[in-house]
Amino acid sequence: MKQKPTFNPFCQFKQVIEVGDLVILHLSRTAIQAITVTPGGVVQNKFGHYYHEDMIGMRYGSQMQSRKTTGYILLLHPTPELWTLALPHRTQILYTPDISFVSAKLCVQPGSTVIEAGTGSGSFTHAFMRSLGDSGHLYTFEFHAERCEKARTEFEEHGLFTSRNGQSLMTLTHRDVCKGGFQVALPDGTPIPYTAEAVFLDLPAPWEAVEHLTPHLAQTTRLCCFSPCIEQVQRTVEVLRVSLWQDIECYEVAFREWEARYTRRVDVTDVIDKLKEIKRRREEGVPKAIKARVKIKEGDTAYDWDRIAKPDSEISSHTSFLLFATKRA
């Protein structure tokens, strides 16, 4: 069914910011905020005041200075990864390490048909829509009525429901799939038959939903269940075995960031000479020379630099268990 096409900033790219555009504000390393550019709007924080009207006409990726202070923010183009960090939380969400791993294991690609149960805050939904491109389709289900309507409004604003040529890309349904299954219908009640190559279940009791998948299984269907507790995994595995699912695997994703930067190269002889000078001053009782501190900017061409990569001391460990299985016709 053809619908009116809308601009989807998560699958399409534009250079210049206009009224009504979604912009991700990078305020600091740990502070990211999403706004819709609105005439008269203003963002206030400890770095200064940033007026929406000043953003209009600027390029995505630009550094925006505050009018009255030396503070600045970055105006970034939306991506699923940035949206995951900036979205309004209606539920617990999946983050990029889990999302990328699940997408790869489920072989989600342009043209795929995917079932998602547990729309929640829409974090994974945005990533799915980018992966499916203009030729796939996502059937996503949410049992909580208010969350479902908020998600619907958000997806409409982001242009996720239709492709650039007006083709329907997503069907959002309010239903408890553990009781009502995964069927969908037209507004007049006519059932829409479909099969899916990938299924993602973010549910408290995924084992109760597995039996309802049978009418919607493709020639080969890959399944992932996102479960915080090992007891949930055990119960789901029991049902999967009875239902003759194969290749059952369980994973946890541990994530560590690496910092890549330049460090100034210091010659060994210079270090030795400096140590000798310090030792001489101590022996002679000469006071330590006070020098003005000079901040050397990283990459200054007056110095030699080496590239280094340093792992973060902290590892983001258990978020949930990721249970995978495959069903072949």
Image: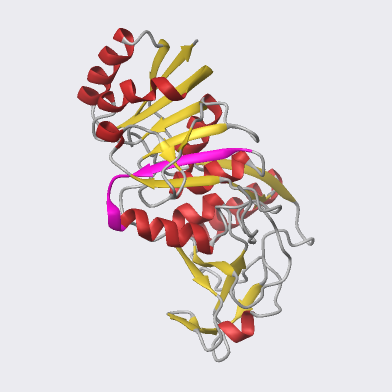
Q: Residue furthest bottom?
A: 68
**In this picture, is 145 found above or below 66?**
above
* Picture colour scheme: secondary structure
* Residue in view at x 56 percent, y 53 percent: 160
Which is more toward the observer, 87 or 270? Answer: 87
- Does the segment drawn in magenta span residue 222? no
Which is more toward the observer, 117 or 127? Answer: 117
- Does the segment drawn in magenta span residue 137? yes
* Residue in view at x 60 percent, y 70 percent: 21
Q: State the image coordinates of residue 204 (x, y, percent, origin top left).
A: 24, 35
Which is more toward the observer, 138 or 39? Answer: 138
- Number of on-image labels: 0
**In this picture, is 107 found above or below 21?**
above
Q: State the image coordinates of residue 148 (x, y, percent, origin top left).
A: 35, 53
Q: Is residue 89 left or right of residue 279?
A: left
Visible residue check, residue 30: no
* Residue in view at x 67 percent, y 60 percent: 298
Q: Residue furthest left?
A: 231
* Residue in view at x 32 percent, y 33 percent: 320
**In this picture, is 324 found above or below 131?**
above
Visible residue check, residue 199: yes
Q: State the image coordinates of residue 265 (x, y, percent, origin top left).
A: 69, 49
Quarter-wise, where is residue 189 in the image? top left
Quarter-wise, where is residue 108 in the image? top right
Q: State the image coordinates of residue 327 (x, y, percent, origin top left).
A: 45, 14
Region in magenta: 136-146
